[in-house]
Amino acid sequence: MEPKNSTGIKYFLLLGLSEDPELQPLLFGLFLSMYLITVWGNLLLILAVSSDSHLHTPMYFFLSNLSLVDICLTSTTIPKMLHNIWTQSKAITYAGCISQMYFFVLFATLDDCLLTVMAYDRYVAICHPLHYTVIMNPQLCGLLVLACWVISVANALLESCMTLSLSFCTHLEIHYFFCELKQVVQLACSDTSLNNVVITVAAGLLGAGPLVGIIYSYSKIVSSILRLSSAHGKSKAFSTCASHLSVVALFYCSVLGAYVDSGLSHSSHSTATAALMYTVVTPMLNPFIYSLRNKDIQGALRRLFRTKLLKGLPFLN
């Protein structure tokens, strides 16, 4: 069943990052490159983890799920933006806008939940190393990922269904490069007070809640590491958390930056540019952050490429 609205509108207009015609080819090339890097980088990470039995651990299981979600998150917004630039059209159908908004909320929430689960995994690994394999068993890992999906789907359905109940008038311009929830709600000419309450509560529970959990986990981790007597042990423990902590900082700083900018800045283009950080830049950088200083991932990638190269050369088999 297609989404319907009480005003019978057929489309919204996505104004994007710039209306300057001379910048469109540059924007198209830039975002096509970033999208391809994001997809291939995260796909390689997933292939490396799945192909190497040494990486079949809870940490890398969650990491491969995060990479998959990052691909989906970016694919929700960038292909439509590239299509609009290529066709010189700013239109997105009403059904397309609601669908894009649903999947964006779904994958953004899922990203947030998985980062929290990964922080819990590091907490158990460092604070309870002797019980790690017992606590983080395959059943619990599967249940944690399932819980992330259930929470994310429920939140996305709630936000989207409430948006479907709104009426829209003649002002249909969205000053973003995708159908962002708050931007769409602000266009409604009916009462949006309940929508705003739900958005605020959801942001508190699913944004601030996981952040508090991550901060608590890392406070325990730091406390546990500082009690270690060996300098080598401290260095190794910190290095296992550095990549995840970097990704968490990048994700939350970019999200907070975008929403603070939307509250303080009167420039819609400035707000849209800030949103690029957590919608495009963060998913693109994640695989590099996790692989640059991770010898396990680097070794798995080398073995993966070596295997594929040998398979491509029959006379070497």
Image (cartoon, grey):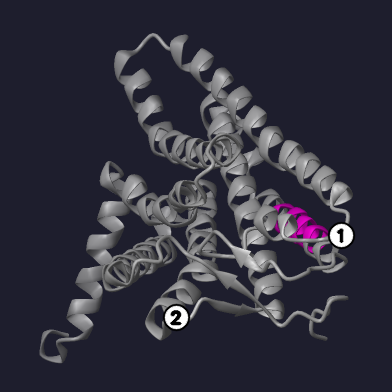
Amino acid beneath label 2? His
User: Which quadrant would residue 31 be assigned to in this image?
Assistant: bottom left
Q: Is residue 221 above or below residue 260?
A: above
Q: Position of residue 307 (x, y in %)?
A: 24, 74
Q: Secondary structure at mark 1?
A: loop
Residue at position x 73%, y 71% in the image: 170
- The residue that mark 2 highlights is 83
Left or right, residue 48 beside residue 313: right
Q: Secondary structure at mark 2?
A: helix
Q: Work out which quarter of the rendered image holds the C terminus and state it.
A: bottom left
Left or right, residue 167 beside residue 146: right
Viewer-side label of 2, 1: 1
Q: Position of residue 214 (x, y in %)?
A: 60, 31
- The residue that mark 1 highlights is 190
Camera-nearest residue between 68 and 156: 156
**Residue 276 numbered mark, or none:** none
Q: Earlier in the sequence, mark 2 or mark 1?
A: 2
Range of residues picked out in magenta: 147-159
Q: Residue furthest bottom?
A: 314
Left or right, residue 110 beside residue 202: left
The stretch drawn in magenta includes residue 175: no
Q: Position of residue 71 (x, y in %)?
A: 48, 65
Camera-nearest residue between 27 and 284: 27
Amino acid beneath label 1? Ser
Q: Is residue 207 above or below residue 279?
A: above
Q: How many marks?
A: 2
Mark 2 and mark 1 in contact? Answer it, CB < 8 Å.
Answer: no
